[in-house]
Image: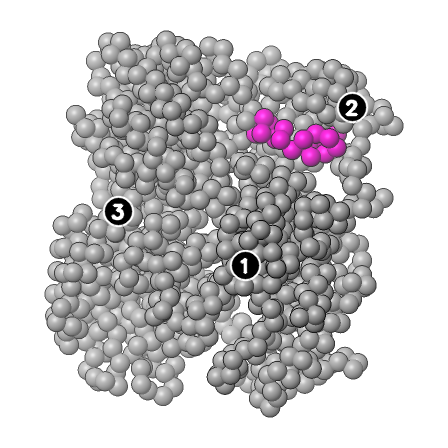
Amino acid sequence: MIYTKVFTLPPFNEAEIRRYAGIGRETLDAQSVEDCLSQCMNETKDIFQGTVCYVTVPIRVCGDEVDLQFAKVKSKALAKNLSGCEKAVVFAATAGIQIDRLIVKYQKKSISKALFMQAIGAERVESLCDVFCDWLKEEGEKQKNYLRPRFSPGYGDLPLEFQKDMVKVLDCTKKIGVSLNESLLMTPSKSVTAIVGMGKLPCEENKLPGKGCDSCSKRDCDYRKVK
Amino acid sequence: MDIREELKNGRFYLDGGMGTMLYEKGLQSGERPEEWNLSHPEIITQIHKSYFDAGSNLVCANTFGANLFSYDREKLEEIVTAAIVCAKKAAALSDTPQKKYVALDMGPLGRLLKPYGTLDFEDAVSMFATTVQIGVKQGVDVIVIETMNDSYETKAAVLAAKENSDLPVFVTNAYGEDGKLMTGASPLAMLAMLEGLGVDAIGVNCSLGPKQLMGVVKELLQHASVPVIAKPNAGLPKNDGVRTYYDVDPKEFSVDMAEMAEEGVCILGGCCGTTPQYIKAMVQATRDIALKEITEKKETLVSSYTHAVVFGNKPILIGERINPTGKKRFKQALQEQDMDYILNEGLNQEEKGVQILDVNVGLPGIDEGAMMEKTVCELQAVTALPLQIDTSNMEAMEKALRIYNGKAMINSVNGKQEVMEQVFPLVKKYGGLVVALTLDEDGIPTTAEKRIEIAKKIIKVAGEYGISTKDLIFDTLCMSVSADVTAPMETLKALHYIKEEMKLPTVLGVSNISFGLPRRDIINSNFFAFALEEGLSAGIINPYALDMQKAYHSYLLLHNLDENCDGYIEFATNCPDEVATVKKAENKKEGSEGTLTPLQTAVVKGLKEKAGNLCAELLANKDALAIVNEEIVPALDIVGKGFENKTMFLPQLLMSAEAAKAAFENIKAAILKSGASQEMKSKFVIATVKGDIHDIGKNIVKVLLENYGFDVIDLGKDVSPEDVVEAVLSEEAPMCGLSALMTTTVPAMEETIVQLKEKAPQCKIIVGGAVLNREYAARIGADYYSKDAMETVRYAIEYEERK
C-alpha cells in the first residue's frame, strides 16, 4: 500500500541555502546580495508544501545485489547501507512546483534571484526528507525498527536508472504529481527519491555507512559540506 | 439514451476503485493493472459486474494507465479493446434494472508538460487522441478524464476527446489538501477552463476522502453551470501494524456522500479504497435525495493555470504594454526575437498590479502566428496572470488559444459578419471571454444608440454559435476627443447602458481618448475615472502611468471596494511624490568609491536601478560607446576578476551583471534613438541539450556574454542536436555553448557535437555543466571545457581578439 503524507516544513536553514548558492559562510561585504537573499526567502516563505509518498517493502541483500521485492538492483554502496535490514521504506518527496515557477520567472527577470531560488528549493526538499525521516524514525522505534541513513539513486554506484522502478512502484505521478522524464530528471525539480533501510538493531555509529556528502566520491564538488 | 439526457432525469452513479479490487485479487505492486484486461479478462469483467450489481450507471473501463508511453500502438489497441469488451460484457451480465454505460477512462500520461517538464503540449494531445480513437471505435458511451493534477494536461486530454469524438466528456481532477491541483490551479480556474472547452460534467476524484474534498466540491457547485461529479477515496490509508485499510467505512462514506448529494452533486462514485459495498451503501443513502436543478451561472470569468479572475464589482486592470504600436524598442525586440525584453514587459506590469496582460505581437514582416505562440508559451511560464490574446490574425489567435493554459480573454470581435464568422467558432472550441467592439461594416457609429444596437446584434449571433452572453465583454470604443469633441460622452453613454441596463461587462482601451493632444496623461486619467464611474468593468491601460493608478486606487477606495483602505494605503505609501524625487536626484551624486565613478560603483555593487538611472544621466552628455568602454566594461572586469580570484562570489557576479544589463538597456535605447547601428561582437549560439530541462547555468553564461557585447542566440533548454546545428548554420555563429546537467544527458551533448563537427566544422564548441570535466569534454569532442561562466567569457573574448 502506498501512503501519502503532507508535512509542515521547519524554518529555512539559511546556512544551507548560502552553501547551495555558493556564498558559503562568509559574511559578504555586499549589502545588495544580502538584501537579495532575504527578499528571496521572504517571497518563498509560504509557498512550500512538502508531500511524500512511500511504501514499505521486505528486502534481501545478497552480495552486491539488493532485492527490494518490486525490483532487484546491483549496488555495493546500497548493499552496504542496507546490510542487516529486513525491510526498507522507499519514498519520493517533493517541495512542489511553485519554486520551479519562480526559478523560471527569475531567470528572465533577475538571474541572481534565480540562483537563490534554486538554492532555497534545494534546501527545502532536503529539509523535507529530514522531517520525513525523523518521523519515520520515531514511528519505527515504536516497533523497534531502526533506520539507516537515506540513500538515493546517483549516490555511490546506485544507478540513476533505478529511479524508474521507484517512481513506478510509488505511483508517483498519481500520488504526489512527481514524474520522471526520459533523461531521468524529476519534475517538479525539487523532488527526491530515496530508500531508507530498517533493521532490528540500531546501527553502530562508527559502522554507519556514509550519509549525504560522505557517501559521495566526488571530493572536489563545490557544494561539498565542509566539516 | 445519450448520457447528457440521462443526467437531467436523475442522480447518476459511477463505479468505485478498480486498483483496490485488483490488489485484492492478487495484482502485484509495480504490475500494470491494464495488462489484466488480457491476462485475466474474467476477473476484470467480474469486478465491473459487481459495480453494476451495486447500482452503478457507468463503469470506467480498465484503461486508466493505457497510453502510448506504456505501450506501442498495436499493444495499446489490444489492451484498450479488451478493457472495453470486459466492461460491456459486465453490463450485459448484470441484471439490475438501471441503465448501464461504459466509459473510456484516461488518467495522466505520467510526464509533466513543458515548460516545467519536457512533454510538448501537441504531443500530449496526440497521445490522448490515439487512446480516444480506439475507444470510439469500440463504442464507449462517454470519455472520462480523471485524476488529472495538471490543468495543462487536462486541457490536452479534453481537446483530444473533443477533436476525435462527439461523445460526452467528464473531467475530474485530483485536488490536494490545500484545495488546489498539484500544479496550482484553483477549482474556479479549472471550472472556467473546462466549461469554456465544453466539458459536460466536472468534478473531483481521488487524493482525499469525502470530508476533505467537501470544500472544493462546494466551490464547484457554487459556480458551475454543468453537473458536478464527486468520486472521493475511502478516506486515507492507515496501517495498524497488522493490516492496511482506508479509514472511512462504507457506512460513513454513504453518509458523507449523501451530504454531497444534498449540496447538489449530481454524479457520485468512489475512487481508491472504495468497493462495490461502498457504492451499494452510497446508492441506498442517496437514491431518494431530490436532484437540485442546475442553473446557468452568470459570472464572467477568465483564468490562468492558477486562478480565475472574476469580472464583478471591482474593475479589472489590463496591462497594454505588450504591444509594438508606437514603441521603437518593442518593435526592435520583436524583430530580434528578444523574448527577455518582451517577458519583462509582462513581469513589470504584473508588479504594477495589473490582473490581466494584453498580448499583441503583430508587426509587418514577422510571422505573427509563430511569434504569438512563442510569446504566450513563454509568458505563461513566468507569470500566472491570465492573458488577453490581441490580434486580428486568425491563425495567430487560434494558435494562442490552443496552447493557452486556461480560459483566455480574446481581443476582439466586432459586428462585422465576416469577423464574427471567424472568431466565434474559435471561442466555441477553446473557450474564452471575447471583447466585442461596437462597430460593424459601416464603421464606428457616432451615437450611443447605434453602438448599443450593434452590441445586441453581436449577442444574437454569438448565441447562434452557442456562446453565452457572459462570455462577451463590450467595448463601446474610445475615440480621440481632438477629432470629435462629442465622442467621449457618446462612448460613456453606451457604456453606461450596457453595464446598467443590459447587465453585461464592459471594457475600454482608455488611452485613445487623448490621441493628438499634449500631456495625454491628464486626459487619460480623468477619462478613466469617468468611465469607472459609469460602470467600466475593465480598463486596458498603461500601468506605469502614475495618474492612471491614482485614479484607479481612488475609485476603489471611494466605492468601498478596498477593505480597510489597505490597497490605497499601500499604493499611497509607495507612491513617489514630486518633491521627494527632486531630493533623491540630488543625493544620487554621492556614493562613488575610491577611484571608481558612480556608475562603476553601482555596477560593482550590483545596484540595478541605480546603474540604470546613472547611465541614463550620463547619456545626456557622453557618447554611448564611451560609456560602455570607459565605465561599464572596466566595472565588469573588476567583478569578473574578483570572482576568478574568489574574493567575490557567484551571486555578486550575477547582481553586477544585472546592474550592467540595466545600464545597457539605456545605451540600447539611446543608440536606437540616434539611428546608429549597434556594433556587436561575434555570435554565440547557446543551448541546454536534448532531455535536459535545468538551464540556470546556461542562462548565467548568457547574461555574462551579453554583458561583454556578444550577440547571444539562446535556443533554450531541451534542444535537439538538429536545432543546434540549424541555428549555428543559419546564424553563421563561430561559437556554440552547450550545457548538460546529468550523466543521462551527456550522450545528447555528444550527439550534438558529432553533428556540429560534421555540418559546421568551423564552429568552436564550448561545453559546461555539473557532470563534466576537462578530460570528459575532450573525449566527447568539445573544443573547450568551461568550469564556470567567467571561463566561457574569457574564451569568447580571446576568440574575438584572435579573429
Q: Where on the picture, by quarter, is residue A167?
A: top right
Q: Where on the picture, by quarter, is residue B253?
A: top left
Q: CA distance from mark 3 to mark 2?
A: 58 Å
Judging depth in this view, the residue of B465 and A147 nearest the camera is B465
The way the protein has been coloured in the rendering is one colour
Looking at the image, is mark 1 or mark 3 earlier in the sequence?
3
- Taking A216 as reference, is B562 left or right? left
At horizontal 31% and vertical 63% (from top left) the residue drawn is B391
Quick one: SS at disc 3?
Answer: helix
Prevalent SS, magenta region = loop
Mark toward the viewer: 1 or 2? 1
Residue labelled with disc 3: B429
The tag on residue B728 is 1
At horizontal 53% and vertical 31% (from top left) the residue drawn is A172
Where is B737 relative to B641, above or below? above
Rendering coords of residue B640 (x, y %): 74, 67
Residue labelled with disc 2: A80
Q: Amino acid at mark 3?
A: Lys
Dot 1, how many residues are within 10 Å of its Cα: few (below 14), some (14-19), or many (20+)? Answer: many
Q: Which residues are magenta?
A: A147-167
Quadrant location of the C terminus of chain B? bottom right
